[in-house]
């Protein structure tokens, strides 16, 4: 598959669960991003990675833990989430951090 | 404080009418502004960016630093323009990797 893919597309989890979101980009980009899109709120940048190094952490709570093992893969590890963390989580990639971002379809997360 | 403001949540126009989606930003440095669009059941994608100074699908947007605005315009709306539109700001200088999005405006073009 081309472009940016995200799995799973939907996830329901309890507050005590541990789960991970996965993002993979097939565009040869070197920068990857996690965004959170809550209902009625703007898209919020969470993390930025460039060449596997985290270059931005936008004051995200520690219950969200990113991992970027290589330039093509990005994970978001989730543990002890709160119901207010329910949102659409979008992954994006770009060639360097100054160019157009290409978005994945998102993972719809529901925390019970 | 919100960096990017899109005052209209919903904008409805008739086909062939002009359309303007408003975007104002808050930043005193040298910004880069973008418009992203999300069509129904599709992913978010870049429509245009101010440094390109292009017209994409008939849309244009001019950065007005005096008014800190980056409104999106099209002289004659088409039904296929119906979508969610997001204005985005990238900060300049050492903060170049900080992006801020507006809450979006839903454009509905009626036949």
Image: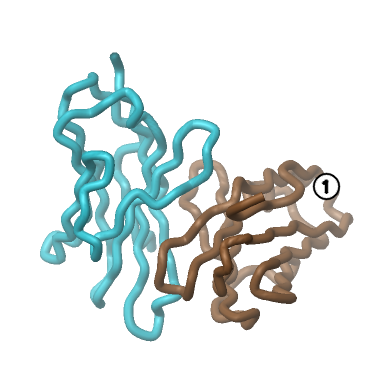
Chain colours: A brown, B cyan
Res. B19 image quadrant: top left
Q: Secondary structure at mark 1?
A: strand
| Horizontal side, residue B7 vs residue A58: left or right | left
Q: Residue at horizontal 75%, vertical 57%?
A: A21
Which residue extends farthest left? B66
- Tell which of A106 and A100 is nearer to you: A100
Q: Residue at horizontal 73%, vertical 48%?
A: A83
Q: Position of residue A8 (x, y in %)?
A: 76, 47
| Horizontal side, residue A49 vs residue B22: left or right | right
Q: Residue at horizontal 68%, vertical 47%?
A: A107
Which residue extends farthest bottom? B94
| Location of residue B73 with respect to A73 vertically, above or below | above
Q: Which residue is mark 1?
A: A13
Q: Position of residue B37 (x, y in %)?
A: 40, 44
Name the image quarter holding the C terminus of chain A.
Answer: top right
Viewer can see residue B33: yes
Res. B99 image quadrant: bottom left
Q: Residue at horizontal 60%, vertical 46%?
A: A105
Disc 1 crowd rating (10 Å Cα; few below 14, some 14-19, many 20+) is some
Viewer can see residue A90: no
């Amino acid at each position: 598959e081309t472009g940016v893919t995200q799995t799973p597309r939907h996830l329901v989890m309890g507050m005590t669960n541990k789960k991970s979101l996965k993002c993979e980009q097939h565009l040869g980009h070197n920068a990857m991003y996690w965004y959170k899109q809550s209902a009625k709120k703007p898209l919020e940048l969470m993390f930025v990675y460039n060449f596997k190094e985290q270059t931005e952490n936008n004051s995200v709570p520690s219950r969200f833990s990113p991992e970027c093992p290589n330039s093509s893969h990005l994970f978001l590890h989730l543990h002890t989430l709160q119901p207010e963390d329910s949102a659409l989580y979008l992954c994006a990639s770009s060639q360097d951090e100054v160019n157009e971002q290409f978005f994945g379809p998102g993972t719809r997360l529901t925390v019970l | 404080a919100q960096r990017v403001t899109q005052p209209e949540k919903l904008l409805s126009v008739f086909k062939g009418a002009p359309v303007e989606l408003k975007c104002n930003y808050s930043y005193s440095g040298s910004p880069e502004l973008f418009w992203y669009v999300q069509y129904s059941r599709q992913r978010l994608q870049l429509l245009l960016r101010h440094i390109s100074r292009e017209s994409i699908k008939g849309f244009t947007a001019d950065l007005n630093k005096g008014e800190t605005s980056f409104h999106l315009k099209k002289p004659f709306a088409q039904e296929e323009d119906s979508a969610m539109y997001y204005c985005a700001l990238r900060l300049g200088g050492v903060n170049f990797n900080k992006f801020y999005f507006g809450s979006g405006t839903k454009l509905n073009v009626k036949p």
